[in-house]
Amino acid sequence: MDQPVTHKPVTWDTSKMDVKRVVDVIRVTPETNTSRTPVDKAPDPELGHDVIPAERYYSEAFMKLEWEHIWTKVWLLGGRADDIPNPGDYICTEIGKESVLIVRQHDGSLRCFPNVCLHRGNRLRPEGIGNAQMFRCMYHHWTYGLDGKIDRLPDLCTFPQGGPPGMTLPSLPVTEWNAFVWFSLNPDVEPFDDYIAPLKDHLEPYHPERMAWKRDVTVEWDCNWKASVDAFNETYHVQGIHPQLQWYLDDVNVQIDCYERHNRYLIPFAAISPRVAMPSTIPPAIDEIMRHAGMDPADYEGRVSDIRRDVQLFKRKHGKAQGKDYSALNDDQLTDDYHYMIFPNVALNVHADDIMMFRQRPHASDPNKMLYDVWVFELVPEGEPWPERVKHRRFKHGERSIGQVLDQDAYNLPTVQAGMKSESFPGLWIGEQELRIRHFHKVLDDYIYGPGQKQPGDM
Amino acid sequence: MDLGLQGKKAIVVGGARGIGYAVAEILAREGADVAISARGEDSVKDAVAALSRYGTRVVGKPCNVKKADDYKALLEWAIEALEGVDVLIPLSSAGGGMGSEKYWHNAFETDVMGPVRAIEAVIPVMTQRKSGSIVLVATTSALEAMGGPQAYNAMKASLITYGKQLALAHGKDGIRVNVVSPGPIEFEGGNWDMIKGTMEKFYQSQLRQQPMGRLGRPEEVARAIVFLASEAASWCSGSHLVVDGAFTNRTHF
Ligand code: FES
Ligand SMILES: [Fe+2]
């Protein structure tokens, strides 16, 4: 493999920022990249400098526009494919006021139905995963097969009009990709491959199917879903609410790439932020990274600034013996956070050994509330037994900790939501480090108002 | 009070940052020629450049004290570059750590053999000149429970014993040896700077335990070290000075 050389995928001038040092990060370049995941810096879109109106975070009218133009139109993340391997296995998941059933068929394919009985509208199943021979409504026992067809309608003869059209639940688009299942409330949605482009190349090399559930949590947050999306779309807040991460990652030398509707940033991990003085001892969180890779930090003779590269080299050398196949990943992917946003509501921190992802769902009726799903998956080394699936837990913000870093994000968001409603706050004043936020809202605008059709005065 | 450091020649091992740098700076400011060494090439270069502003001779070279031969060569080079040596202050340290036997080897090589090898290099020169002063730097972690049982604390403790016995043995040669044990010291890029950033609660609890409500600064320890190293402390030898803002609980009878 070629020796990675230094190049400059960062668009802002780090030397003029509030930093203590200027750091030249060693990076994989398009020339030295060995992965199908591209490292090329995408040209930054021209998105202007307008304020992003705060109203869209609390207006019920805007929430309605989102429902009409986004949630009922796009592809949505439903769950993990390996939760439903056998016929009759299903995922019941909610989005806004809707709920769907994603069901494994006898032939191995998937079908998706609205989770609502055609008789008087009862929900067929509560949210969660399970297995069913059939879906029998609790109310009057209308019974549906795995394919959504009504197999039994008690006293059919008492319905002079007959059963509902086709005697079947309507089918919704559903597909499986990269260990996850995706569905759409839009029967005419574009092909999934078109929608997800260009992320197939980006994310498939991580082989999420080799990773097992580590954490499955849903937290009810008191903020608009977009406030959460924004919070994970920039590293500018690290120096604000996550000071400890400055001894763990480089929040300044971040590459941002915006695509058609999705975007990403690449953050060097196992690194020291240029915002703090270089320590002479190994910070605890980086010590942890080294141990996880199989290194003994006590044995490390290099400088703290060399650790990131040395962890990459170590993993490259010893991964195979540890049952970890890193062959599809480039060296940077062995340490760094490649962080993706799949429009509209999925944030993924993908790493060689794990994926930490968030699904950010709107509340059914209140723009000031949302559901924050935390899904963590960990690579299962070859030869090791597949761990038992973790149990899903759901609670309200503040009832339990979700870990130091996410707690820091979580405790901040209700005050953001409250402040945004102030009449003296017109909207978000966005900087270059927050380009992904601007891009996300531009994509949102294009869905809601039509491409480039947003007018001055629109929310 | 005149420290009598004008024209003296001092070697500071671990002199590029923290207490070591503060020591080197006071020495240079007081008119001494200074040779420094540390692990990082850049940090040594930066420190030499900064220390040169006081107008004395300042030289420096990077060195890993664990590499005995390199280290001995470095010490010889320093004595030669300074054309002698009056003061030695070896502060090299591998820092703390638990959970691997390797930490004991690191602490032994760096915290113990770092000073020991430096002392062996300067004693013949000082004996010949019938004058010299050595200050070893231990830690209050050697005196009281701090950060859990670990190699750093135990290895640093050995310097207190070794320092006293050196003083007994070399008094006749005109060489004074003293030990300074600093409490927690905070400076940019230091451990406590990182702890403040990464473990805010623990840091605050440390502050609450401090009688003066703060941690020490490098120059506050460095002034005590330089005093003991200087002619002004001509009757101080074999002493152990705790510089901790009254942090340790025990009474130092
Ligand atoms: S509502 Fe489902 S059977 Fe009546
Ligand atoms: Fe955050």
Image (cartoon, coloured by chain):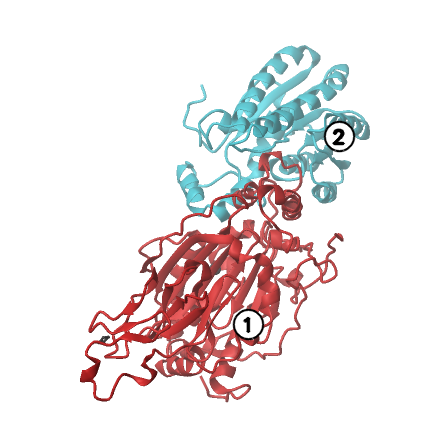
Q: Nearer the viewer, residue B228 or A9?
A: A9
Marks 1/2 same chain: no
The residue tagged with tag 2: helix, strand or loop? loop
Q: Which residue is drawn at 44% across and 32% down?
A: B247
Q: Mark 2 lies on which chain?
A: B
Which chain is displayed in cyan in the rendered image?
B
Say left or right for A151 vs A415: left
Which chain is displayed in red in the rendered image?
A
Name the quadrant containing residue B113. Answer: top right
Q: In this view, does A177 lie above or below A239?
A: below
Find out if the beta carbon at label 1 lies less than 8 Å from the nearest ligand 2 atom. no
Q: In this view, does A387 lie above or below B111?
A: below
Give, as a three-letter code, the residue at label 2: Gly
Say left or right for A13 vs B100: right
In the rendered image, is residue A278 in sight? yes
Q: Where is residue A314 in the image (x, y as percent from the top left)?
A: 65, 43
The residue tagged with tag 1: helix, strand or loop? helix
Which residue, given by chain and number where applicable, does mark 1 sit on?
A196
Contact between marks 1 and 2 (CB within 8 A): the answer is no
Find out if the beta carbon at label 2 lies less than 8 Å from the nearest ligand 2 atom. no
Q: How crowded is mark 1: few (under 14 residues within 10 Å), some or many (20 or more)?
A: some
Name the quadrant containing residue B54. Answer: top right
Q: How far apart are marks 1 and 2 (CA)?
A: 73 Å
Q: Which of A70 and B75 is in front in this view?
A: A70
Q: Residue A244 carries which label?
A: none
Quadrant where the C terminus of chain A sits is: bottom left
Which residue, given by chain and number where applicable, does mark 2 sit on?
B7
Say left or right for B92 vs A84: right
